Image (cartoon, helix red, strand yellow):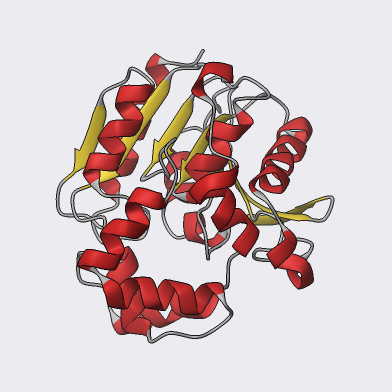
Amino acid sequence: MNANRFGDLEVLACSPSGKPAYATPLLFIHGAYTGAWCWAEHFLPYFADAGYTSYAVSLSGHGGSRRRTVLDTLSIDDYVRDVAEVVSRLPAAPVLIGHSMGGMVVQKYLERAGAPAAVLLCSVPPQGLMGSAIGLMFNKPNLINDLNSMLNGGHPEPEGLREALFHQPVDDAALMRYYRQCQPESHRAIWDMTLFNLPQPGRMHRPPMLILGAEHDHLIPPAQVSMTAAIYGEPAHIFPGLGHGVMLERDWRPVADHIAAWLPTQIV
């Protein structure tokens, strides 16, 4: 695993070892409150072993990237520009794999440019976050309070992170490691995803698209994943027994296996 600087952006990279690499790389885009680190635990080494040169960017204001001190001013369009900047520095156009907010960033990027393929993983739907927020208010009021606390720079209890990301057991040491790496999110980006800068599917390039969700996702429930799939004319695959943080769940491998099986059928 290499930590690189693409200008002022932190980019983690993992390359195949001892085997030819696919010509098409992968670029992973994280969700709100996290950074590129969430892909380093399992997905980056897994896909490198599968033959893909794999990259994960920390969007501006996240991880080790630029503009941490002005996080709250950053918009979804700023994050889209981050992705475009990284893409321009890669040896070939990458498959874009976005989780949660990162899935929204992928959709907005596709309004501006194409990609060989795209994976939306527990992604914010084209309709935005309003449906999710209303569902949380009725079904998980303590969780939405914890998310709002993080949004405002507070430090909710680790159990709030457990409820937000995990359905399966996660040991306390791993949970605390993830907890220490979580961070606030931009209010402006949250409002963009709720109301002010939603995707416009009619303007988007339409590469092959894989749309995945998780059975026990409280933040982007399966019904919203299915709505996303219907809008893009693709099937939705919902993984049983998993929560929102699929790349960190104990049984992350079936998700990675599913993506790995799909990719060679879509890219040259």
Name the quadrant containing residue 18.
top right
* Residue sitting at x 40%, y 78%: 146
The picture places residue 153, in percent across and down from the top left corner, at: 58, 80
Q: Residue furthest left?
A: 240
> Residue 198: x percent and y percent?
54, 38
Establish if 237 lies above or below 122: above
Q: Is residue 73 left or right of residue 175?
A: right
Please, which residue is most extreme toward the right here? Answer: 7
Residue occupying the far top of the picture: 268
Give the camera-side residue of 128 and 7. Answer: 128
Answer whether residue 254 is visible to the viewer in this image: no
The residue lying toward the viewer, choosing from 51 and 37, is: 37
Residue 230 % position (x, y): 30, 24
- In the image, 3: left or right of 147? right
Query: Where 41 falls versus 87 (above or below)?
Result: below
Q: Is residue 121 left or right of residue 186?
A: left
Viewer-proximal residue among 104 and 93: 104
Q: Relative to the observer, which residue lies in front, 30 or 12?
A: 30
Image position, residue 10 (x, y; %): 71, 57
Q: Identify the residue shown where x is 84% and y is 50%.
A: 7
Residue 42 in view, yes or no: yes
The residue located at (50%, 54%) in the rendering is 31
Q: Is residue 74 above or below residue 103?
A: below
Q: Residue at x 33, y 64 (%)?
A: 165
Q: Quadrant of the N terminus?
A: bottom right
Q: Identify the image quadrant of residue 233.
A: top left
* Label tally: 0
Residue 94 sits in quarter: top right
